[in-house]
Image (cartoon, rainbow, N blue to C red):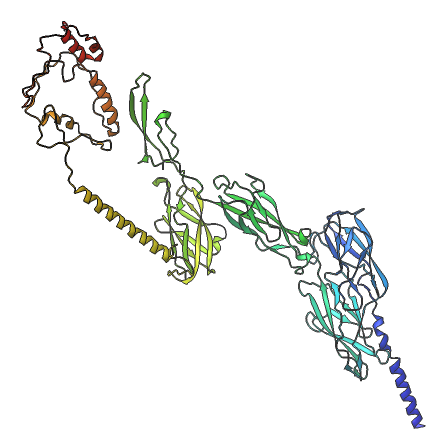
């Protein structure tokens, strides 16, 4: 009897093993969406193409995360990860649109309704902002919960299926409940045989934040007790435990991952309340100016955190309303149009917008202030005296090279309207009164400093205006230069002491300084600071040229100077050698000839401004043995122009007096008999004079001599025997 009972017990055990309910436990997990209905709230009735509305979540009781979804409304598209987007623009009728989204699982079509609802803005809740989009199930509505089964075991509690993967539980953040809200049911395959009690441990269960997740110990339903925040924690890892009442542990602990689905509940935040930058006024279109940046706390790499930048306002709008452009992805601001002029518009203020969802989501604003700095884009102005214009050019700058001691000298040329025009010149001296029309400037444009214990740099300040509009000067750092530099005036208030106050990486930096004179007239100057990896005043820059020149450049310059000096020396020796060769004179010094006077000096040359008129008299002065016995005429002498004080006018002086002398009948030699006591020696020829000739030449016509001037008229009268 005992043996028979033992056989029956064995058959019963085999029967129970064969029809063990755990073999069909996997079917208790029902595929479906995690909500009975999805509601996506939008802030406006008209929606643009490509806009992302949110996500639908589907679980097919496997580890799959991508499915083939179908939208009943062709204007909407659902991606494989459940993201709902607009294929084209949509205008909500009566403030909402409703349609179905479906997918297939295990040969069965599963459908969920979706509603797009226009909702006006009403403040904030749990960091929800304008343009909010939420995925929220209808209160009180639920589907059959997904079931998570403990891994199969054999031989008691020993696991045999090592590749068993428990899919994560996807749950949206900021879910509004009601709470506690069920998430999933955990089951043990032994609950048909023995009574099982369930529990959970881990962060959010028995560890902080304690009580965020709870489980019904009898049914195994897992609950969440309050809204989840992905920005605080994007997933929670729990351990589920199944214990057989009265007999201890029934299953090995099962790991459960609760993945928090990101919702667009954070708007972009600019890294600065106000951005500042500088741009030289000579910048070309496309030159980069500065960068603005914003961050988004939503899930990185998703559309919720994909920020786009836009310039929505420029002040002032001159000379073009689009002087600057911005890269929508990187935030770099660049010059978009020519015409920057510091003297007309020294500063621009741009209002920048940052929007997530690729520019269609939540928005925030900031300002970018761009200062236009001075550039050497104004060529010097030169003034020329052009006699042929007969005009006096306007004087606009007391710093003109023609101005000395605040006096401008102008040479005025006058010409009359005679057939042979007479000219006259005069000098006009204009005394200029100084005005404060020049802002002070910094002489240095480039400095080199060490990044450790940097030595102060002295910058020289100059002002083209007079002393009344110059020193003492003042200086102020502009823009972001405050962060790394300090600037102050020296004791004399004529120089700037610039000091690096923070340790910077090696490289070139821009420092913008505003220098003002004692009347407040100022301008911004840009200094390029090369920061080198060194210490103190011993500036040593790796791969940098010493003082801007390499060693090879310095050696080249020295070689060129030495070569120039050598060539100059050779040229000087050559000239001295040629100068030492004695040239044979054209006339021998002891050669005495009739009627030839030797002049050893020809007077001033055209490059010589110190004229000595006495050289014109040296012909007779050098021959004291020759003299004249002239009879001075009694006619009135004309007036000769006095010697001018200005050497530049000596040419006109000589020309005018030469013309006067040529037409002066009283000028020597006079038209009278000249008696020479010395005519030279050794001549056997007779006299060539016709005064003592026996023939007076009555048959000659001397009227032609009348036209040759007063002196020849006198000679004509003498030959004709005239009365005069």
Instruction: Residue lying at the far right in this picture: please name it.
Output: 1
Quadrant of the image containing the N terminus:
bottom right
598 displayed left or right of 220: left
Quadrant of the image containing the C terminus:
top left
Vertical relation: 197 (above or below) 668: below
Front residue (pair 677, 231): 677
- Give how far across and how far down residue 715 sits, in percent: 15, 11
- Give how far across and how far down residue 561 sits, in percent: 30, 51
- Give how far across and how far down residue 80 sits, in percent: 76, 60
Front residue (pair 366, 14): 14
Q: Who's the residue at 88% across and 85% down the image?
A: 13
Which picture quadrant has residue 200? bottom right
- Give how far across and how far down residue 146 sits, in percent: 81, 68
Instruction: Residue lying at the far top in this picture: please name it.
Output: 723
Front residue (pair 487, 16): 16
Q: Who's the residue at 45% across and 42% down the image?
A: 377
89 displayed left or right of 347: right
Which picture quadrant has residue 192? bottom right
Which picture quadrant has residue 264? bottom right
Vertical relation: 199 (above or below) 98: below
254 displayed left or right of 375: right
Vertical relation: 49 (above or below) 187: above
Residue 16: tell me if it is visible. Answer: yes
**Total numbered labels placed on residues in the image:** 0
């Amino acid at each position: 009897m005992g043996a028979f009972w033992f056989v029956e017990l064995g058959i019963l055990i085999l029967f129970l093993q064969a029809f063990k309910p755990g073999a069909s436990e996997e079917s208790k997990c029902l595929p479906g969406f995690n909500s009975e209905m999805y509601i996506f709230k939008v802030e406006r009735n008209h929606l643009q193409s490509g806009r992302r509305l949110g996500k639908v979540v589907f679980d097919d009781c496997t580890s799959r995360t991508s499915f083939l979804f179908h939208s009943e409304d062709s204007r909407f598209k659902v991606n494989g990860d459940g993201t709902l987007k607009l294929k084209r623009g949509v205008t909500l009728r009566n403030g909402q649109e409703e349609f179905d989204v479906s997918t297939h699982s295990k040969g069965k079509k599963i459908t969920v309704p979706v509603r797009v609802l226009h909702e006006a803005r009403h403040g904030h809740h749990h960091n929800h902002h304008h343009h909010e989009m939420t995925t929220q199930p209808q209160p009180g509505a639920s589907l059959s919960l997904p079931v998570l089964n403990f891994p199969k075991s054999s031989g008691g509690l020993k696991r045999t299926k090592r590749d068993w993967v428990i899919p994560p539980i996807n749950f949206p953040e900021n879910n509004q409940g009601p709470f506690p809200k069920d998430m999933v049911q955990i089951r043990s395959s032994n609950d048909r045989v023995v009574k099982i009690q369930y529990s959970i441990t881990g962060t959010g269960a028995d560890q902080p934040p304690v009580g965020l997740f709870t489980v019904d110990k009898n049914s195994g339903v897992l609950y969440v007790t309050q809204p989840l925040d992905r920005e605080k924690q994007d997933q929670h890892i729990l351990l589920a435990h199944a214990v057989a009442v009265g007999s201890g542990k029934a299953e090995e602990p099962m790991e459960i991952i609760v993945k928090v689905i990101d919702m667009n509940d954070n708007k972009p935040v600019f890294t600065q309340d106000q951005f500042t930058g500088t741009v030289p006024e000579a910048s070309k279109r496309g030159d980069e100016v500065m960068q603005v940046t914003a961050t988004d706390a939503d899930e990185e790499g998703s559309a919720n955190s994909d920020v786009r930048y836009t310039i929505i306002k420029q002040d002032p709008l001159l000379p073009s309303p689009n002087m600057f452009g911005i890269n929508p992805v990187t935030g770099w601001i660049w010059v978009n149009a020519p015409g920057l002029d510091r003297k007309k518009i020294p500063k621009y203020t741009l209002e920048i917008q940052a929007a997530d969802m690729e520019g269609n989501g939540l928005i925030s604003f900031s300002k970018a202030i761009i200062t236009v700095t001075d550039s050497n884009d104004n060529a010097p102005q030169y003034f020329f005296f052009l006699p042929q214009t007969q005009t006096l050019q306007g004087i606009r700058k007391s710093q003109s090279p023609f101005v000395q001691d605040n006096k401008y000298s102008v040479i005025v040329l006058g010409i009359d309207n005679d057939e042979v025009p007479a000219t006259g010149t005069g000098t006009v001296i204009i005394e200029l009164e100084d005005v404060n029309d020049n802002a002070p400037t910094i002489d240095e444009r480039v400095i080199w400093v060490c990044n450790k214990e940097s030595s102060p740099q002295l910058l020289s300040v100059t002002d083209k205006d007079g002393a009344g509009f110059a020193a003492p000067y003042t200086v102020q750092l502009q823009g972001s230069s405050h962060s790394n530099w300090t600037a102050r005036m020296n004791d004399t208030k004529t120089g700037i002491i610039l000091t690096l106050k923070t340790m910077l990486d090696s490289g070139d930096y821009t420092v913008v300084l505003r220098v003002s004179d004692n009347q407040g007239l100022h301008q911004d100057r840009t200094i390029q600071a090369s920061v080198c990896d060194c210490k103190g005043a011993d500036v040593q820059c790796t791969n940098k040229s010493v003082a801007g020149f390499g060693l090879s450049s310095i050696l080249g310059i020295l070689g060129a100077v030495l070569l120039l000096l050598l060539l100059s020396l050779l040229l000087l020796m050559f000239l001295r050698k040629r100068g030492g060769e004695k040239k044979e004179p054209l006339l021998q010094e002891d050669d005495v000839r009739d009627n030839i006077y030797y002049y050893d000096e020809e007077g001033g040359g055209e490059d010589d401004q110190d004229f000595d008129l006495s050289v014109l008299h040296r012909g007779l002065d050098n021959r004291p043995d020759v003299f004249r016995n002239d009879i001075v005429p009694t006619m009135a002498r004309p007036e000769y122009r006095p010697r001018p004080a200005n050497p530049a006018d000596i040419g006109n002086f000589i020309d005018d007096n030469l013309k006067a002398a040529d037409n002066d009948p009283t000028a020597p030699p006079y038209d009278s008999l000249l008696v020479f006591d010395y005519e030279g020696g050794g001549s056997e020829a007779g006299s060539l004079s016709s005064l003592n000739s026996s023939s007076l030449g009555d048959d000659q016509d001397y009227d032609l001599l009348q036209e040759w001037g007063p002196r020849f008229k006198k000679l004509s009268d003498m030959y004709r025997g005239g009365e005069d």
